[in-house]
Image: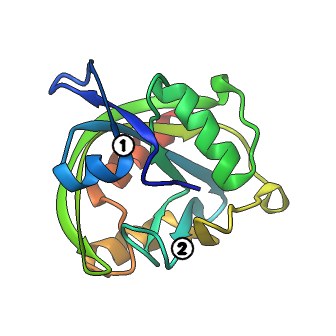
Amino acid sequence: MYTDNELFDILNESGEKTGQTMERGEVHRTGALHGSVHIWVIRRRLEGSEVLLQKRASDKDSYPDCWDAASTGHINAGEDSLSAAVREVEEELGINAAPSELIPLFRCRVREDNVFNGKRFINNEITRVYLLRRDIRDEELIPERAEISELKWFGAERLGVLLESGSGDFCVDREELREVLSCAESLLG
């Protein structure tokens, strides 16, 4: 579970650490550039690929009650993106993944200025995107109830249609999902 006083490394525009750290609450008040990870879980079925999404808890300070990538989180001060991805998968999904099971796909830039629950929330991140390359059985999934209210598999095609329709139930970036699915196609066969 996150707290406003978690420490994050502040990054420059190239994604390198500046040597400065800042508390989580201040990072999102000021819009300081910091790192995050998104971990996608995709399984192949005869009828097509399925994408695991988490429904964010209703008391989250950003995107409450929205469907998001299977596991997401910040990179803590002194941590690298792979270590953060391993930690987040364990914390949020209950999956003890080996670093070799987390395949780095790409990184993307997120810049958003929103209001959630009456508070301004500036998100300015460089996100490292990973694919968890592992067959996941539903009974293995143990969602962290403090952050996740539900886990659900979505057919990839249906999910694309829902995102194209502009449904406010999702905070998944359409372009990120397209890129993840393209990468997964070649990696998962």
Residue beneath disc 2:
57
To which quarter of the image does residue 62 belong? Answer: bottom left
Let me know if residue 189 appears in the view: no
Let me know if residue 120 appears in the view: yes
What whole-number distance in Å separates the C-alpha atoms at marks 2 and 1? 22 Å
Residue drawn at the location 82% of the way across and 55% of the way down = 140
Between residues 77 and 105, which one lies in front from this camera angle?
77
Numbered label attached to residue 23:
1
Query: How far across and down, in percent of the image, does residue 143 sit?
Result: 70, 62
Q: Amino acid at mark 1?
A: Glu
Residue drawn at the location 37% of the way across and 68% of the way down = 160
Q: Nearer the viewer, mark 2 or mark 1?
A: 1
Question: Where is the N terminus found, in terms of image quarters?
Answer: bottom right
Q: Amino acid at mark 2?
A: Ala
Residue drawn at the location 27% of the way across and 53% of the way down = 28
Question: Where is the C terminus found, in terms of image quarters?
Answer: top right
Between residues 48 and 156, which one lies in front from this camera angle?
156
To which quarter of the image does residue 155 belong? Answer: bottom right
Between residues 155 and 105, which one lies in front from this camera angle?
105
